[in-house]
Amino acid sequence: MEAESDHVKEMPKEVAKAVKAKKAPKYIPWPLRPGNYGLVYIQEKFNWIFTPQLNPLYFLGSITFLLLWVALFSGVYLFLFYEMGATGAYESVQYITEDQKYYGGIMRSLHRYSSDGLMIVIVIHMAQVFFSDRFRKYRWVAWVSGAAIIPVLWFEGVTGYFLPWDQVAQVTSIAISEIISTLPISAEPMERLFAHNDAVTPLLFFIMNYLHMAVPMLLLILAWIHCMRISMPLINPPKQIMYPILLSLLTLAIIKPAVSAAPADLGNLVGDVPIDWFFLGVFVVFEKLGLAGGHALFWGGAIYAVFTLLPWIIKDPKKHEDTLSMIPQVDVLVDLQKCKGCPLCQQACPFEAMILVNRKDGKNYDTQAEVIPAHCAQCGFCVNACEFGAVSMGNWNKGTFHDFVTKVFQPAPGGNGESIPTSIAFICERSFNLDGFLTDDCMRVATTPDVGVMVIPCIGSVSPSLVEHCFEVGAKGVMVIGCRGLDCHYREERRRLHLAKEDGSHKFLVESINDNRLRIMLVSPLQIEKIRQEIDEFNDELKKGVTA
Amino acid sequence: MKQRNLTPGGGIMLFLPIVFIGIFSTWPSYQFYGPDESQLLLSFKKRTVKEHLCDEKELEAYNVEMESLPKHMRARGRECGSRARVPLEVNIWLDGEKSISKVIKPAGIHSDGVVFVFEKFTFKSGPHDIKITVRDQKDDPDIKTLEFNEHLDFQPRKVTLVTYTPESNDLLIH
């Protein structure tokens, strides 16, 4: 330990401080936090079935968009044949359903089932985001806008169920009018609109139809807000997922077409009626709880408010000083003396926190990089992306990274006899539980001391030049160990490594390095033994010169 | 990156959500009202009397004030008295037992609008004595209590709507 201390003393001050602070990690690694573990377990099962590249749980946001497009396009078709008015509405929907069975009927079914799918996928997506700890801090805009989508989508569904003017519409209208009547927006109780059949005017159908068409615009605006702080949002799911989903919707539309219940009659009470539990189940829940009108609104609103405010109610349990990462996650700074105004850091940022603005210091460049702290995830992608060492996080910049790696492959001062590592592993601090995986000083892999370690916030920040530098200073091999698929907390690591070719930013394409001495391991948090095994195997290969 | 194909298991799994949707989009059906339930609905709007009506002296002063104003500034069709109107008392008895008793305020910040009444009352179908009284809440012997007192045979799952007609100033079945 003494020798290790000497080794630490020789490091740059900040590095030594960071290393010393790692000796007693107190935080709970995220895969072991309650809830997170369950999510990881389910995602892993899905990875086994679908492969990590095509796991639909990693594409819930884009599946939402797919279902939204289906609902929108089918809705436009239905609108062409819809008539406003109590009798006309029911008959026109019946005409679409029965007389155009293989056109309008299928369209109506697609419209309905895609809407149900939307509700399900959004709820699962939010649960996933919550349990993977991706709802706080710089992600609050996405969380709040996502939370706002649920009631808006629900309202859209309710207005849709009004339009056929069948018995489902009847109970829905009465229930929703009881709730709206408690709001101080009109002196006249809205329930009076549904007191008798003559009270239901064509104007009401016009308003509901208009609302049903206008609300999707609000949904699209919310979707835009939801994605606006994400640099490369996934809008379309892979076609291997998209086609089966579309086919499954079509199959259900043919096997079980959506149909209307009996026509609405306000002179009669509705008895047994088949209801869509995804949208209308909430009315039943309220009724069972004895909540109607204002009570339903109050309790529904209170639960929803708590849900929306979760980013501020549940604080992040992680404390930066307790994490195993070498790099303290603090504010990113730009050194204008070194900044050349190129877009490398901007391209690297997954959350649009790095922007280019007009040059202010009089240097002969058009632009300069600027950080928006509120957007910044402190992932460190930009730090190594900057070729000029202008971007730093807690005094770590490209140069410090390189210095650290150089130190790792230098003999410890005083010659304590400790062997120099043969290779180095860059490990994402969130990819799996690192407790017990590393030596006490977090500098080596405990079971394979030949492998030096650098724990970092995300492997997306490992640049090709850093890998090359490792080889230059004597590393026989470099391992980049991170999360599998879109498990990445910063959501971009996979694309930074694999898909960067698509937008031309080869800068981040670590995997394109054609060198057998580089091994990228994308791992499951539940497969620590496999990771150890892979590290051992790679290390053995290096020793034997297999990879040379 | 190497293009991957969906595994057979993955293909099957992607069809499972649609089965879930197919089932729960209509099943189980829900019974909102039982086969032996009936409903009485009381829905109408009524303008109640003013809280304070002018006495002779006040009326005279009011008329003088109106006369002094240019024609276009005179209040047309406005009675002399307070702006606010009195609340409306609504009581419903089923088989002699009082089931609903409410005092409903007129609409508007100044309580100068009409009173909107919407009351719903669900009970077992069959023959029942129904009594409904509606009265402007003011100590004035001239104010008439509107009364609906009938023995009715309420059919299962039927809604009986009782409403107010200003023409006859009475409560009637719609």
Image (cartoon, coloured by chain):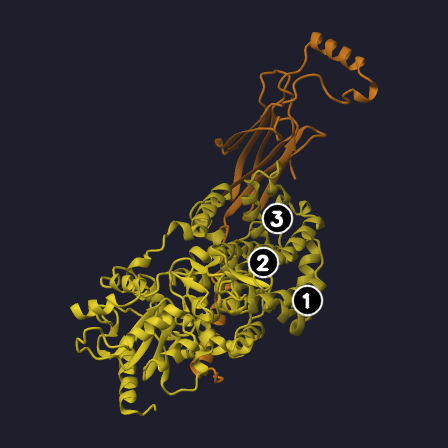
Chain colours: A yellow, B orange
* Residue annotated with mark 1: A77
Q: Is residue B109 visible?
A: yes
Give the residue at x 67% y 50%.
A207
Q: Which residue corresponds to mark 2?
A: A219
Rendered-image quadrant of the C terminus of chain B: top right
Give neighbour class at mark 3: few <14, some 14-19, many 20+ (Cα, 10 Å): many
Lower sequence index among marks 3 and 1: 1
Q: Is residue A463 above or below residue A228?
A: below
**In x, y percent, where is residue A88?**
71, 57
Q: Mark 2 or mark 3: which comes first in sequence?
A: 2
> Whole-percent x and y of residue A169?
59, 54
Q: Nearer the viewer, residue A30 or A472?
A: A472
Query: Residue A103: which quarter of the image?
Result: bottom right
Q: Neighbour class for label 2 at 10 Å: few (<14), some, many (≥20)?
A: many
Q: Is residue A198 left or right of residue A60?
A: right
Q: Amino acid at mark 2?
A: Leu
- Work out whether residue A105 or residue B8 is closer to the camera in this orientation and state it: B8
Question: How many neighbours does mark 1 have within 10 angstroms: few (below 14), some (14-19), or many (20 or more)?
Answer: some
Q: Give the residue number, with chain letter if any, for mark 3.
A: A266
